[in-house]
Image (spheres, grey):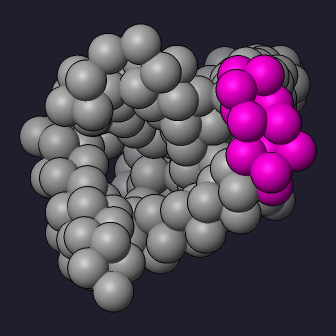
Amino acid sequence: MPCRHCEYDLRGVPATPTGLVLCPECGNTNPPYVNRERDEATSREAAKQALMKPLVIAASGILLGGTVLAATGGVQYLIGGAIIYAVTVVVSYTVLCLCCLAWVGFSSPVGTMALHVAAIHAATGSLFILVNAISPFIAGLALTGALYVYLLSDLTEMDSGDAIIIMVLNMVLYLGTGMVIAAL
Ligand SMILES: [Zn+2]
């Protein structure tokens, strides 16, 4: 039971006659225990919702991207896509963690962040595969970048400015790696 204002642990702190709990650390009042139990149930529900969203995005992205890959190149594309997906998720997750350490700050638990990255890459990856199949490379890149920024700021609740920087870092990293591989 943390204080709403300073996170001080209020367990064992007696309530005032009105039912409010006065925080001994910061002096602010907290709502009665009954409300707080309900609030905790609500926030547990919210936490479940917060996990559902990236799970649904990840599942639909993987399904869509996998279907397009299988339809265009069969099992070979599917395996290639799965390997690229796994590698880019790990790399982007590392980039995201480093950026959070460097200046963005962590807004979600690291496990949830891994799920966010998995969802973002499933969505942007499947979009890229789709768009790339019907239009020039640069169009796929622009759309993918925009979706990346949107999902990253939406899921992790970071500033879109920070999300843009992280997207550009990732894109430079992937395009650079792609060019090196192509040059070899
Ligand atoms: Zn407090």
Would you say 73 lies left or right of 93 here? Answer: right
Task: Find residue 17 and report its image quarter.
Answer: top right
Question: Does 103 appear above or below 150?
Answer: below
Q: Is residue 131 visible?
A: yes
Q: Residue at x 49, y 72 (%)?
A: 91
Which residue is at the front of the view, 103 or 9? 103
Query: In the rendering, at what x and y percent does residue 56 appear?
Result: 77, 22
Q: Residue at x 25, y 70 (%)?
A: 179
Question: Does 80 appear above or below 158?
Answer: below
Which residue is at the front of the view, 10 or 48? 48
Would you say 173 lies left or right of 122 here? Answer: left
Which residue is at the front of the view, 55 or 177? 177
Question: Does 15 appear above or below 146?
Answer: below
Asked whether 78 falls inside the magenta stretch, the response is yes
Q: Residue at x 41, y 26 (%)?
A: 132
Task: Find residue 142 and report its image quarter.
Answer: top left
Asked whether 167 falls inside the magenta stretch, the response is no
Q: Residue at x 56, y 50 (%)?
A: 117
Task: Find residue 138 and report its image quarter.
Answer: top left
Query: In the rendering, at what x and y percent does residue 183 appear?
Result: 26, 79
Query: In the rendering, at what x and y percent does residue 5 appear?
Result: 42, 45
In this rendering, the count of numbered labels is 0
Predominant SS of the magenta segment:
helix
Which residue is at the front of the view, 121 or 53? 121
Q: Which residues are magenta?
A: 68-79
Quarter that holds the C terminus:
bottom left
